[in-house]
Image: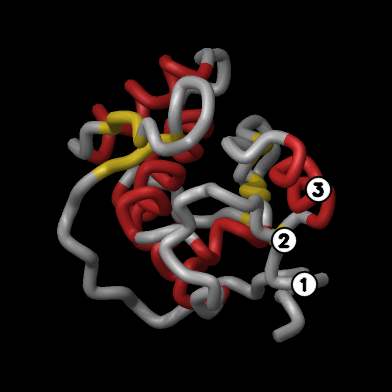
Amino acid sequence: MTSGRLVAGMPYASLTPMPFDRFARELAEYAGRAGIETFELELYPELEEEHVRNPRRFAQVTPRRQPPRFEFAPQVLHLGWPNRLGLIVHEIGHVLAPEADEDGADRAGSTALQIPITYDMRWPGKGLQIAFAPYPVLRPATIEPRNLPRI
């Protein structure tokens, strides 16, 4: 797997991907704060292609599966902290409220974590989730990520 093909004209924060283990620790920090102690995380190859076709498409989660499974396009590693946090809060919202639509997932995640989500209108359509909170002190990784990007 690559680090993700970037879509021309989209406001990625960096052309160089951040380390996947750091992203895994970010997700683990906020999942833990929401009461989700175990989960699976994967950089999902099919989402890489979907993201190229639809630049807002970065993630999906299987909330009813135990443990829940978070799948992200490799391009998420090129986003800045506010957009990564917005996506993390949103996907956690899907786990907390599996019947919710997209706006309901935003509300569920925002309520549980006390982090409001707004939309970054530099991205097409509705925009991309964005949230603002100080960067957390991250604990060591406790999960075994799969499908690590080749760099």
- Residue at x-position 34% and y-position 59%: 81
Q: Amino acid at mark 3?
A: Glu
Front residue of 34/146: it is 146
The answer to which of marks 1 and 3 sits earlier in the sequence is 1
- Which residue is at the far bottom? 151
Q: Amino acid at mark 2?
A: Arg
Front residue of 108/88: it is 88
Residue 33 position within the rendered picture, expressed as x and y whole percent measured from the top left: 30, 51
- 2 and 1 marks in contact (CB < 8 Å): yes
The answer to which of marks 2 and 3 sits earlier in the sequence is 2
Q: What is the spatial separation of the Cα atoms under label 1 and label 3, in whole angstroms?
A: 11 Å
Q: What is the spatial separation of the Cα atoms under label 2 and label 1, in whole angstroms?
A: 8 Å
Is residue 31 among the parts visible in the rendering? no
Q: Which mark is residue 5?
A: 2
- Would you call the spot at circle 2 few (<14 residues within 10 Å), some (14-19), or many (20 or more)? some
Q: Amino acid at mark 1?
A: Thr
Image height of 38 relative to 111, above or below: below
In the picture, which quadrant includes the N terminus? bottom right
Residue 150 position within the rendered picture, expressed as x and y whole percent measured from the top left: 76, 82
- Which residue in the protein does label 3 denote? 49
- Residue at x-position 34% and y-position 30%: 119
Q: Secondary structure at mark 3?
A: helix
Q: Is residue 108 left or right of residue 41?
A: left
Residue 110 position within the rendered picture, expressed as x and y whole percent measured from the top left: 28, 31
In the picture, which quadrant includes the C terminus? bottom right
- Residue at x-position 44% and y-position 29%: 127
- Which residue in the protein does label 1 denote? 2
